[in-house]
Image (tube, rainbow, N blue to C red):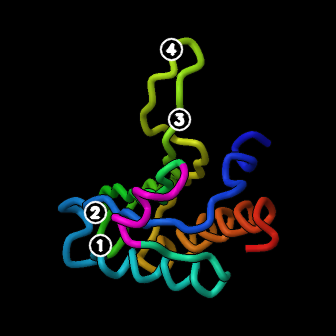
Amino acid sequence: MLRKESLKGIHGIYVVVEDLGPELRGVLNRSEVRKRVEAQLQTAGIRLVKELEAAKLPGEPYLYVNMAALPLGPKRYACRIDLEVHQLVALVHNSSTGHAITWEQGVVTAGGVKTIFNNFDELVLDFICDYLAMNPDN
């Protein structure tokens, strides 16, 4: 429950897509993944912000996307997909601050691009559901 509650009060999110690595080069690209997640967030009514605006929001939130793959054969991959929300947090004992993962969901899948994107879309939907549950007046 704390994972979901960490999304409460976020009024915009910046999307960061990690480099996909050489295994997926020519199969998927960062821009394609970013556009896919941003389209889903916008359709759900979640406000997207640019990096500079995110840095001015409370907690400096961003949605981090990471995909790592190993080839299994022609057009087939074993793929680890992670979605994480990072926010600025403070340590209780000394009040020092830094970014930490406050929400995360991941999956390991195997198959072609369609399978990878189906699993990716499910993770994005998990985030959307948790976000909207905590921000119903979004």
Q: Amino acid at mark 1?
A: Arg
Disc number for residue 112: none
Q: Amino acid at mark 4?
A: Asn
Mark 4 → mark 3, Cα distance in angstroms = 12 Å
Q: Is residue 29 left or right of residue 41?
A: left
Q: Amino acid at mark 2?
A: Leu
Do the residues bearing badges 3 and 2 touch, measured as CB atoms within 8 Å?
no
Q: Earlier in the sequence, mark 1 or mark 3?
A: 1
Instruction: Magenta stretch: give its range.
Output: 50-58
Q: Nearer the viewer, residue 93 or 125?
A: 93
Do the residues bearing badges 1 and 2 touch, measured as CB atoms within 8 Å?
yes
Q: Earlier in the sequence, mark 1 or mark 4?
A: 1
Q: Earlier in the sequence, mark 4 or mark 3?
A: 3
Q: Position of residue 40 (x, y in %)?
A: 57, 81
Disc number for residue 94: 4
Q: Position of residue 24 (x, y in %)?
A: 26, 68
Label 3 Cα crowd, 10 Å radius (few <14 / some 14-19 / many 20+): some
Label 4 Cα crowd, 10 Å radius (few <14 / some 14-19 / many 20+): few
Q: Amino acid at mark 3?
A: Val
Q: Earlier in the sequence, mark 2 or mark 4?
A: 2
Q: State the image quarter where residue 49 is shown.
A: bottom left
Residue under numbered circle 2:
20
Mark 1 → mark 4, Cα distance in angstroms = 38 Å
Identity of the residue drawn at 67% across and 54% down:
7
Mark 1 → mark 3, Cα distance in angstroms = 28 Å
Disc number for residue 89: 3
Label 2 Cα crowd, 10 Å radius (few <14 / some 14-19 / many 20+): some
Report if residue 120 is visible in the image. Answer: yes
Q: Nearer the viewer, residue 42 or 88?
A: 88
Residue under numbered circle 1:
30
SS class, disc 3: strand
